[in-house]
Image (cartoon, rainbow, N blue to C red):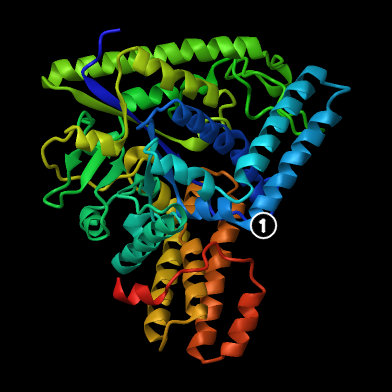
Amino acid sequence: MTAVPGAFALVLHSHLPWLAHHGRWPVGEEWLYQSWAHSYLPVVDLLERLAAEGRRDVLTLGVTPVLAAQLDDPHCLRGMHHWLGNWQLRAHGAVPRLPELAAREHRAAAWALERFEARWRHGASAVLRPLVDAGVVELLGGPLTHPFGPLLLPEVRAWALAGGLADTALRLGHRPAGIWAPECGYAPGMERGYATAGVRRFLVDGPALHGDTALARPVGDSGVLAFGRDLEVTYQVWSPKSGYPGGRDYRDFHTYDHPSGLKPARVTGSHVAPHDKRLYDPQRAAAAVARDAAAFVDVVRARLLALHARHGRPALVVAAFDTELFGHWWHEGPAWLETVLRALPDAGVRLTTLRGAEAAGFVGEPVELPASSWGSGKDWRVWAGEQVSDLVELNGQVQKTLVQTVADAPTPDQLANRLAEEALLALSSDWAFMVSKDSAADYARRRAHGHAAHVTELAELLRQGRRAEAVRLVAGWPPAPFGHVDARALVRA
């Protein structure tokens, strides 16, 4: 097929908050293991197969440091292996009632166990690094524990970002030159901090560029490029109101066979009650994948042609999603993703990464960006609205306590380092998001206030010089994600 002027960049962002050692169903480690089994294993397997075929610059992949820490953590690796075995046992238990579903789930669990035991038992870093080394993916980084950057004190923001980039370099041998800022949160001036940290590229949501996402744009005079999500294309897949995963023939995420925990139904209809949903049919789902992948390829081609006609030059389309959409939230997502990644080049569309787009010259004139995010209203209301005003106040106090305590510490100290990790966990954007969206809001508040209480208690013991008590206190806490955080670097940030 005739080549289309321009290029398409797919960005996947892998993120879960620090869930290790914080319980199982309905929240906690169960979320991690579900996403690991249903998204990370199949998506990475796809990338490895494309790599074996000699494919390069396939997509841009963000893995937040807090998720990378969990995917490398021995406790989580043991827990994941147990979870996969239990998945297979749950499938066996469903045989008398749902034999076809049980057989499918048995095969899926067996495949996941084989892949995990063969490739993942020593952690994700050993799996991801060859893909990065070979240029199959461009790696995006970010701050250590996914805080909402615009609400951080400048010194805390700089320190968290530097720590996150250093952690990625330690795990994968590459210090990312691009980031997916948590929640795409941006405040004017943050680009200068990015430049200082060596960041050349970052994501914003399309409205921050007034919908003009056809080219990356330098922000002010910083030289740092903002890439905007093309919502016209991205929302074909998933939007606040619609998208392919809601199609009637795909497996329904929310309907369970409660004795086994397996999901036997297809969506059937958006207003159909769970007990009225039809049984899942893999053949119908496969036909939907083929249909929706073809539709998406047509949308991308048409969008690139329209942008070329409008601007008089080849343009760039960036579609960006959470990795967890592909497999976890949308069971057929990995199959759809593979179909699209193979079909786009056959349709004359060049695949690239953000790095590749910059190198190819898909860069426009400088722009000044407004405060923005990719949340509701494309502003900060999800993380700073009235509904979470108590968390905003709490986070402000946590930061002040952190900065003051570290500044007063006479020497680098493991207790101060642990204080800093607890502060960063308290500052995670996930807690406000879950409260604003009423998704496990009680759990989120407990986590935020629990970590903040740790900060207050430990800081007071350190202020009073009661170090032996501080050591005993920390020994009773769940392990923290990182063992190499340098709190003293906060003073230098």
The answer to whether residue 22 is seen in the rendering is no
Q: Tell me: 75 left or right of 431.
A: right
Residue 245, x across and y down, in percent = 52, 22
Residue, far top: 1
Give percent across and percent down for residue 170. Answer: 44, 59
- The residue closer to the viewer here, 162 or 57, is 57
- Which quarter of the rendered picture does the C terminus lie within? bottom left
> Where on the picture, by quarter, is residue 275?
top right
Vertical comparison of 79 with 319: above or below:
below
Q: Which residue is mark 1?
A: 75
Could you tell me how many numbered marks the image carries?
1
Q: Residue at horizontal 45%, vertical 31%? A: 51
Seen from the viewer's position, the closer of residues 138 and 273 is 138
Q: For this rendering, which residue is in front, 113 or 205? A: 113
* Residue 238, horizontal then vertical, whole percent: 45, 27
Farthest residue, direction bottom: 465
Residue at 57% over, 65% down? 480
Left of 295 or right of it: where is 335? Answer: right
Q: Quadrant of the N terminus?
A: top left
User: Residue 54's image quarter?
Assistant: top left
User: Can see residue 490?
Assistant: yes
Q: Amino acid at mark 1?
A: His
